[in-house]
Every structure is written in C-alpha cells, then in structure tokens.
Image (tube, rainbow, N blue to C red):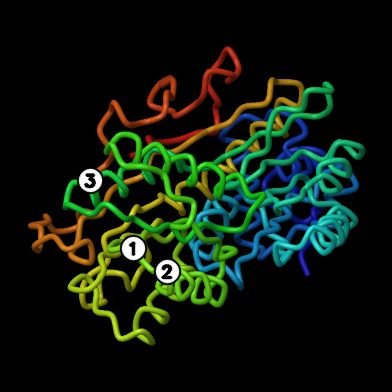
C-alpha cells in the first residue's frame, strides 16, 4: 500500500507538501498540487481520513437528521444534500429523528459524538432541547425546511434554509375560489411545525383575498402523515355541509386524503376538487393529474450544504435564513381543463409580487439579514 512518502518521492516534493495538499492546511502552487494529485492517482494512494482529522480537527463529514423514511419530501432533499456534500468532498452520516423531540435529541447527540463537522437538521415540532444542545456545544448547524423563531433571550441563532409556504398556499386557495368554490377544506400538518403554521396563515390569507369567511370546521390536522390525513379527511366529509374543494398541506397527507375520498365513493374533481402542497414524481400519473405546489427540494438540500460550509469557513458571520420560491403546477384535479405545458417545464413560478423578499447578490438568493458579502459557496439561482 502506497504511503505519503511514496507520493512525495513520485511527485518530487516533501511529505509536508503532500500533507498540505491533502489537508488544505497551507496554500500550494497549482502545478505542485497537480503533481501531488497525479502521483496519488498513479500509486493508488488512499488518504487515511482518521489520521487527517487529527491534523485538521475536521472529519469532512456532515450529520443529516431528517425524517426521510416517513416523509417522501425529505427523500428528495436528501438527494440534494448528498450531491452537494460529495461535490465538496464531504461524506454524510444520516439519522432519522422520526419527528419525535426525544428521539431527535438522542440521534443528534450521536451524530455529534461521531465528530461531524456540522449538521443539517429538520427540527421537530418541539425543538427546545435540540436547540439548547446545539447552542451549548456550539455545533455548526443549518435548520432545514422548518424554521424557528429568532430567540428573544439572545441565545444562539441558526442558519436556516427553506421554501416559502404562506404565499403558495394562498395561491391554491384563491385558485379554487376562482373556480367558484366557497367551502374549501384544509388538511393541515402537525401542530407546532413552522410549515404547518405558515401554510395555515396562507390558507387564511387566501380566504381573505377571495372574500370568503374563515370556518374553523373546515380546518383539520392530518399531523403531516398519511394515516392522520385519512382520518382528518373523513372527518371533513362527515360535516353537515362538507367542503366542495380540498387542499392538503404535504404529499404524505395527499395520499391519505385520496384514500378517504375513494372510501367515501367520491370522484376528483367531479365530486370534490383537490389541490396539494408538494409535488411529487407520480403526481402527474394520477387520473386526474394533481394540481400542486412544487418545492425545489433538491435545491434546498444543496443550498443547506453550501450555507453550512460557509458557516464552517466564517464561524462568526451573522445567521441568515434563505427562502426559496415555489412553483404552481397547474393540472386537472382542481377541476380545470388540461393545461398546455412545454416539455421539461416543471410549473409556473409564482408571480414576482407573490414571491418573498429575497435580496440578490450575484445571482445568489439571500435574505435581508445576510452577511455584508455574498456567500462564496452559494451557486445558482432559485426559481
């Protein structure tokens, strides 16, 4: 097995120079760096990551805690995280907190004990213990998808990456109202999640914009999962005056709602219109095809990695929140006729007036509390 000394001899440099190339502990001239990399390739040299972590105090690993198994939306986010991590030479350690605060705290501690360089976490509905642990141990962290309020007591703030929720939900409601619906039901998510509260706000805003009253009986909680949504939808359908249109607040709950509608012998959209928050791979295969809000989930995951790496490079910069706009994917489950769609077109981005206020620096999405200079690791636009 080749050693660093073998690589140094082949490249005609010192062992220290090889170490600097591997560990990025000192700038190395481009031609020298390339000579070292070529020597490694020729000799089949494999770096000892454990030994390297002792030198750099970095393991080049990221801890990811998301409920990827129970929530299909997070599966696509995971793909974005993994691709961006590998692009920057980082590995992933993945844990599923099951949206349970106690289990969440345990798995995050286990990831921390594995000496990951930083974490990306989709927090539960009650993340107090989690945030206290991360703040106490000063763990570089990006909160994913679900945001937390800015602490009033001056405790640790965290970087956050998510999609907009309120405006897109309002768009679904006003679209259904524009089709003549006056009783629009909502299958909301798990209470306590920021996505749940924001989508509830969007639902109410949509009713106000459409001049419709807010009827609490038309809002039920499916707890962000399929079985809960099935029960919640059945409760809506049992009302004396049930809704004529339904909005589901995530893709897992859409599945449960469809089961409940089927069990009640209702046809979409002939008997009841349906729109959903979260597009997914097979939404286009349903009959009718599902009108949905599409979140750029892979982009969100990749952006979380870039924000985390920027945090590792600049530990003292102000915390920031990045929000991505969503796209309205107009299909037929809402009761509309088939819409022409160009090949490869994922959906219509929300109008600029409906988008959250993001500041743009060199094509990079950031919020008003971003650092003075643009993130050097952020790439691309969000649309």
Work out whether residue 22 or residue 118 is closer to the camera in this orientation and state it. Answer: 118
Residue ID for mark 2: 239
Picture residue at 68% right of the left edge, 38% below the top: 148
Q: Secondary structure at mark 3?
A: strand
Tell me whether circle 2 and circle 1 mark residues in contact (CB < 8 Å).
yes
Tell me how far mark 2 sits from mark 1, CA to CA.
8 Å
99 in relation to 85, above or below: below
146 in relation to 330, above or below: above
Residue, far front:
240
Residue 37 drawn at (x, y percent): 62, 49
Residue ID for mark 3: 348
Q: Secondary structure at mark 1?
A: loop
Residue ID for mark 1: 243
Instruction: Please tell me which of labels 3 and 1 falls first in the chain.
Output: 1
Q: Residues within 10 Å of mark 1 (few under 14, many from 20)?
A: many
Which image quadrant: the C terminus? top left
Left or right, residue 261 beside residue 67:
left
Single out the mark in the foreground, 2 or 3.
Answer: 2
Instruction: Please tell me which of labels 2 and 3 falls first in the chain.
Output: 2
Which image quadrant: the N terminus? bottom right
Q: Residues within 10 Å of mark 2 (few under 14, many from 20)?
A: few
Picture residue at 86% right of the left edge, 47% below the top: 129
Q: Residues within 10 Å of mark 3 (few under 14, many from 20)?
A: some
Tell me whether circle 2 and circle 3 mark residues in contact (CB < 8 Å).
no
């Amino acid at each position: 097995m080749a050693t660093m000394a073998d690589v140094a001899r082949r490249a005609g440099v010192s062992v220290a120079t090889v170490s600097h190339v591997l560990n990025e502990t000192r700038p190395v001239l481009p031609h020298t760096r390339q000579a070292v990399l070529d020597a490694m390739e020729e000799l089949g040299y494999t770096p000892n990551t454990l030994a390297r972590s002792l030198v750099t105090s970095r393991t080049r690993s990221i801890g990811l805690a998301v409920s990827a198994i129970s929530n299909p939306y997070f599966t696509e986010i995971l793909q974005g995280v993994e691709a961006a991590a590998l692009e920057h030479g980082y590995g992933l350690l993945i844990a599923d907190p099951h949206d349970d605060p106690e289990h969440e705290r345990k798995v995050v501690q286990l990831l921390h004990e594995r000496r990951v360089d930083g974490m990306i976490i989709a927090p539960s509905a009650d993340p107090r213990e989690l945030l206290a642990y991360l703040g106490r141990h000063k763990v570089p962290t990006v909160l994913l998808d679900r945001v937390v309020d800015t602490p009033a007591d001056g405790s640790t703030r965290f970087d956050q990456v998510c999609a907009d929720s309120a405006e897109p939900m309002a768009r679904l409601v006003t679209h259904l109202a524009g089709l003549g619906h006056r009783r629009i039901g909502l299958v909301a998510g798990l209470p306590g999640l920021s996505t749940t509260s924001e989508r509830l706000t969007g639902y109410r805003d949509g009713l106000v914009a459409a001049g419709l009253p807010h009827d609490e009986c038309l809002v039920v909680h499916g707890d962000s999962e399929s079985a809960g949504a099935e029960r919640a939808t059945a409760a809506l359908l049992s009302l004396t005056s049930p809704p004529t249109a339904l909005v589901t607040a995530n893709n897992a709950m859409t599945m449960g709602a469809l089961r409940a509608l089927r069990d009640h012998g209702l046809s979409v959209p002939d008997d009841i219109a349906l729109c959903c928050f979260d597009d997914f791979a097979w939404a286009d295969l349903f009959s009718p095809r599902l009108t949905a809000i599409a979140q750029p989930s892979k982009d969100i995951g990749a952006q979380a990695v870039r924000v985390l790496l920027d945090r590792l490079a600049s530990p003292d910069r102000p915390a920031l929140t990045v929000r991505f706009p969503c796209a309205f994917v107009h299909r037929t489950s809402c009761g509309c006729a088939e819409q022409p769609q160009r090949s490869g077109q994922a959906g219509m981005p929300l109008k600029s007036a409906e988008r959250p206020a993001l500041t743009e620096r060199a094509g990079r999405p950031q919020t008003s509390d971003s650092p003075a200079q643009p993130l050097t690791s952020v790439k691309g636009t969000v649309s």
